[in-house]
Image (spheres, rainbow, N blue to C red):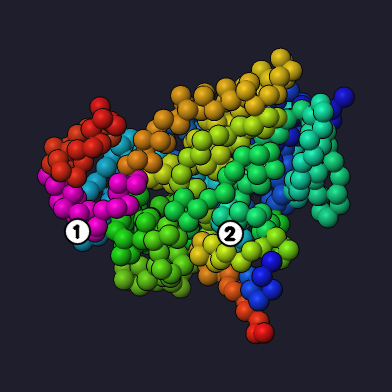
Amino acid sequence: MHDYDVVVVGAGPGGSTAARSCAEEGLRVLMVEKRQEIGAPVRCAEGVSKSELSSLVEVKKKWIAKEVQGAKIYSPDNTLITLSAEQAGNEVGYILERKIFDRWLAKQAARAGADVLVKTAAVGVEKEKDGLRVKLRRAGEFFEVTVKMIIGADGVESRVGKWMGIDTTLKLNEIESCVQYLITGLEDMYDMEYCHFWIGHARSPGGYIWLFPKGNGSANVGIGVMPSMAKKPAKYYLDKFLESEGISTSKIVEVVAGGVPVSPIDRISAERCLLVGDAARHADPITGGGIINAMRGGKIAGKVAAEAVKRDDFSAKFLSRYDELCREDFGKTLERNKVLQKKILKMKDETLNSIAKSLEGYRMEDLSVTGIVKVLIKKNPKIFWDLKSLFF
Amino acid sequence: MPSNCKIVVDRFRCAYCGACVSVCKNDANELVETFLVIDESKCNCCKLCVKVCPMNALSVESSEG
């Protein structure tokens, strides 16, 4: 008899959703989190789409820090484009309080029947004939659990995939290196009903700068840069930006850093293993947003795991069903956005400026994402012609 | 691995984000809760972790001779 059917490694939104989904399917599930506190330290800008989040969980006021109306995007020469929340994609709508949100999700998993252990790291896996022996370290003490399968929701630094034969190693052009400050006293400088994005290779090579309001004049102000394109560390560019904007660095109440995977991988399952969220490289290549896909993947992972337990089939072949379901659900959009991202990364700042200028005068609030791309192609046929087949 | 090259972490700068772990082919880095551990026996000093670090917390310590 195995100790559990499934062990879930990592208690972020992906792990907790997977654990809850497994428990609701009637599986015996253990979720382990290496940190002593779920949800902290945050590594995230905390923006999510309103409609997508509502489709996954009942929205609770206690973990919504701020609701925003849309996004303001500044081109390298500060030409401004305004988008409503629905068009700005996965990234804006609600700004979460992840410390509360992540804990709430973990509690939901526990209430559904999952066992939860914090300050407990998975440090290795041994494959056995009829299952897995997972090595855990809790507050320095080593112990083992036997399980039928493992769900790796262990984030950007995932090791579960590597142990189970999935190469999740990221190259320097497959990750955004990020740093973010929670700054207060910004209400007189920016429209705090909007998320703000600054693009351009000079100020954020291969990435962008964001300002996401969190209520009471505070905002997450952060940057992501692509290490293959940036000559200096992310923090250097963020500090330079704050200086150029005249944002005071004497009202910073939190510093967080993070790595965001921005390149989907071919396989996210193996024999007795599924990967979820950032571990599965499921963050959006353009926005870097990962919460929604992590939760969607987590839900699917629970269902596939339940099916595997029912059939007693944990083969790579059967579990590849998870890859297919994720691809149908959101994977295709990731792949499409990867193509678009590669294209944007090659653009010079002058090109980005001329594109932004081409959109001036259009009431962007009236357009869908596809509509925006249509305008882009119409206004910039030479630049965007090859995207036609991708979107239409 | 190369004895004249060693990656060191400045614990006062590190914000324990795990970016360095994700780029390591040899699984030499482990983010243990809120501190980074580098297994020198696995590290081949490719320096990718140094480049990916958002906080400039990693560097190469070269020893002469």
Tell me which secondary structure the magenta stretch mostly adopts.
Answer: helix
Q: Is residue A316 above or below residue A89?
A: above
Say which residue label 2 marks: B20
Taking the spot 38% from the left edge, 45% from the top edge, the residue there is A286
Q: Is residue A296 above or below residue A353?
A: above
Residue A353 covered by magenta stretch: yes
The image quadrant where one finds the N terminus of chain A is top right
Residue type at mark 1 is Glu
State the image quarter where residue A76 is shown.
bottom left
Q: Is residue A9 above or below residue B40?
A: above
Q: Compare residues A246 and A332 and report the one nearer the observer.
A: A332
Report if residue A137 is visible in the image. yes
Report if residue A114 is visible in the image. no
Residue A224: x %, y % from top left: 43, 57
Mark pair 1, 2: CA separation: 33 Å
**Span highlighted in magenta in the image:** A341-362
